């Protein structure tokens, strides 16, 4: 359709006097056309002025598709601000700014480069909308500085300095349009990166109102970003590309009848949102996967398998840190220590009973390490989960399937399920909510069934279950219910892959991690769903390890990885800014009762408590 549109326009574009036609044809023959859309003229070459299609021959649907195609290109032309949860990309239109800004060296391969709606050719960054010549960007929003914590204030100034070179309003009027910049905000989970980002965007759009911000984040937290934007009410419209519903605030919303029965079409809705983002001062929200599809042209960086096992020595890590210092702002989370009631971290080594131990020993060693670890992780929770694994012939011959199936709803034959059932029982008695993380859906599904059976609870009321296949609205509804102090929710079972980043679960004061993951940051992110700004209680975390299994070794290797990460991403003033467990000792009445109980104390092996 786009190609046909250009062919039609090429005939119309040459209508006129013979002299004019000859001049246009001569010019067109010697020009490598770079087409732009001018809403008064049509599709026109930005260099020679030749009109390929007059505006009167462009129907509304074609207009929108053309715009959509051009905006996909524009997603490649961005200035990067990275964080541990999301990327904020500030797009400066190449025509308005007189320059092309790229991220990671991506080249624009499309024939469409120009500004679709404003052919002024002016520099948007030299058109800074500043009504005052004195002061700094802090003065743009009265009292905003006092509402931020010190590390957020530092991060705010760090972003401005790295992107534009200054926070001074007078100097920003003279900003160099050719300046390129970017930075990484490496702040600990739960320390307010979202609010920091919104304050920055609010001020940036006041100074450069024609810039187009894009927030790229995991798809499962985009609705959380929507909630935060509404909560802080920064006065800037936003469009979530992954939400297949029109909000009613899109630009030209009354004209979507162009699409007739396609108004529920996902691509049509995305076109409307892209146009709205481009036409007015607003923020675009988009997932990593969708951004990759729309932006295109990027090659994934693949690490050679032979290099994967190599570890940088400490000296090389220090050199890397020195190179990164100018554009990485680090906060390890000391603000959480100062402003939250506390964090108590506990590692529990639990002793499997005879049946569970026999089942663990029946797992056949395999060259497929991932398959072997998967079986160990499931059986260390409850022996019946062995039935959910792909068994070898040898394993089939030694396992009693009927016996394990009959024991499926009995939590007391699995050491971790036994701990969890009694733990949740006691937490309910003291009115504390429990957040349970696991890598595996089979594990969470079994625990869900056991809780229903043991306490006569219902899924969706007392037991909430969050996993990857839920749509984003369902997940957001579960989050709201769990955090509501007046709800009946008592426990949230969550997939660590789908729920460990970017969401707020401060309704929980007890966090249980059923298995060990190789990436320590995933575990840290999971804990910080509850241990974050806004938490009113002491947060207790429990890492459950099965005695006599590789889980203990895996946990130690995880700790070493965490140490190496600390060496790279550490503040210059590391001694005063480390994320440490609070030095105050907290009593854990729930765990103490379990350890001392006659029927339960036998399952406990080693305990490592911090502090």
Image (tube, rainbow, N blue to C red):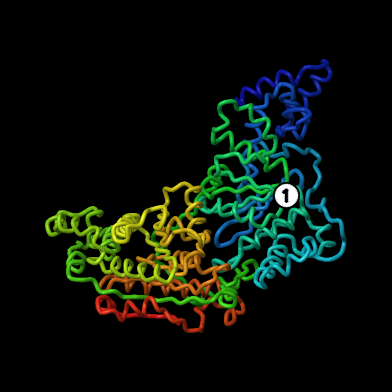
Quarter of the image for residue 138 reads: bottom right
How many dots with numbers? 1
Look at the picture and state if 278 lies above or below 522. above
Classify residue 592 as left or right of residue 299. left
Task: Indicate the position of residue 578 as horizontal and vertical percent values.
Answer: 55, 78
Q: Where, quadrant-wise, is the N terminus in this rendering?
A: top right
Task: Indicate the position of residue 479 as horizontal and vertical percent values.
Answer: 49, 56
Quarter of the image for residue 493 reads: bottom left
Q: Is residue 264 visible?
A: yes
Q: Where, quadrant-wise, is the C terminus in this rendering?
A: bottom left
Look at the picture and state if 242 lies above or below 252. below
Classify residue 336 as left or right of residue 556. right
Classify residue 462 as left or right of residue 318. left
Q: Nearer the viewer, residue 176 or 534?
A: 534
Classify residue 407 as left or right of residue 573. left
Q: Residue furthest top?
A: 18
**In percent of the image, x 72 and y 29: which residue is there?**
43
Task: Indicate the position of residue 425 as horizontal and vertical percent values.
Answer: 35, 68
Q: Nearer the viewer, residue 289 or 336?
A: 336
Judged from the image, the secondary structure of the residue bearing numbered disc 1 is loop
Task: Indicate the position of residue 170 as horizontal and vertical percent values.
Answer: 85, 62
Q: Nearer the viewer, residue 225 or 181?
A: 225
Look at the picture and state if 5 lies above or below 101. above
How crowded pointer 1 is (Cα within 10 Å; few <14, some 14-19, many 20+) is rated as many
**In percent of the image, x 77 and y 52: which residue is there?**
208
Quarter of the image for residue 171 reads: bottom right
Residue that badge 1 annotates = 211
Q: Is residue 495 visible?
A: no
């Amino acid at each position: 359709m786009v190609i046909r549109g250009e062919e039609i326009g090429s005939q119309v574009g040459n209508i006129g006097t013979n002299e004019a036609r000859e001049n246009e044809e001569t010019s067109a023959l010697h020009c490598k056309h770079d087409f732009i859309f001018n809403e008064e003229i049509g599709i026109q070459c930005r260099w020679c002025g030749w009109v390929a299609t007059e505006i009167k021959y462009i129907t509304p649907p074609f207009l929108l598709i053309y715009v959509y195609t051009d905006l996909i290109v524009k997603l490649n032309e961005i200035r990067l601000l990275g964080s541990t949860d999301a990327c904020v990309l500030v797009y400066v239109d190449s025509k308005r700014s007189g320059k092309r800004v790229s991220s990671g060296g991506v080249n624009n391969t499309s024939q469409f480069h120009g500004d679709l709606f404003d052919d002024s050719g002016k520099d948007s960054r030299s058109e800074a909308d500043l009504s005052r010549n004195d002061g700094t960007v802090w003065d743009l929003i009265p009292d905003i500085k006092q509402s931020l914590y010190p590390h957020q204030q530092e991060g705010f100034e760090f972003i401005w300095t790295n992107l534009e070179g200054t926070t001074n309003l007078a100097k920003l009027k003279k900003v160099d349009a050719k300046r390129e910049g970017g930075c990484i905000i490496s702040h600990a989970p739960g320390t307010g990166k979202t609010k920091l980002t919104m304050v920055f965007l609010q001020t940036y759009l006041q100074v450069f109102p024609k810039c187009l911000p894009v927030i790229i984040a995991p798809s499962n937290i985009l609705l959380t970003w929507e909630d935060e934007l509404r909560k802080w009410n920064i006065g800037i419209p936003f469009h979530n590309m992954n939400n297949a519903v029109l909000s009613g605030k899109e630009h030209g919303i009354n004209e979507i009848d162009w699409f007739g029965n396609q108004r529920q079409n996902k691509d049509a809705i995305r076109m409307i949102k892209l146009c709205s983002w481009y036409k007015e001062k607003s923020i675009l929200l988009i997932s990593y996967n969708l951004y990759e599809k729309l932006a295109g042209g990027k090659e994934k960086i693949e690490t050679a398998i032979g290099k994967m096992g190599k570890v940088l020595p400490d000296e090389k890590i220090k050199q890397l840190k020195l190179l990164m210092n100018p554009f990485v702002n680090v906060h390890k989370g000391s603000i959480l220590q100062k402003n939250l009631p506390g964090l108590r971290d506990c590692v529990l080594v639990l002793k499997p009973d005879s049946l569970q131990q026999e089942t663990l020993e029946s797992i056949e060693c395999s060259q497929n390490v991932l398959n072997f670890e998967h079986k160990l992780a499931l059986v260390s929770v409850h022996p019946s989960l062995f039935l959910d694994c792909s068994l070898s012939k040898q394993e089939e011959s030694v396992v009693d399937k009927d016996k394990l199936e009959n024991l499926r709803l009995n939590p007391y034959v699995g050491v971790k399920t036994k701990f969890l059932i009694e733990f949740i029982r006691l937490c309910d008695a003291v009115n504390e909510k429990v957040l349970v993380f696991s890598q595996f859906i089979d594990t969470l599904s079994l625990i869900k069934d056991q809780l229903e059976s043991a306490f006569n609870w219902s899924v969706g009321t007392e037991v909430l279950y969050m996993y990857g296949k839920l749509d984003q609205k369902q997940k957001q509804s579960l989050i709201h219910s769990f955090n509501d102090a007046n709800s009946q929710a008592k426990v949230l079972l969550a997939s660590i892959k789908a729920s460990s980043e970017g969401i707020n679960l401060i309704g929980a004061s007890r966090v249980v991690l059923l298995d060990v993951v190789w990436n320590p940051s995933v575990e840290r992110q999971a804990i910080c769903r509850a241990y974050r700004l806004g938490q009113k209680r002491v947060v207790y975390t429990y890492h459950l390890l099965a005695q006599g299994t590789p889980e203990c070794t895996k946990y130690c290797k995880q700790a070493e990885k965490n140490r190496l990460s600390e060496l790279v991403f550490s503040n210059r003033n590391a001694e005063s800014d480390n994320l440490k467990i609070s030095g105050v000792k907290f009593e854990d009445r729930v765990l103490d009762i379990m350890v001392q109980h006659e029927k339960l104390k036998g399952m406990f092996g080693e305990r490592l408590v911090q502090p």
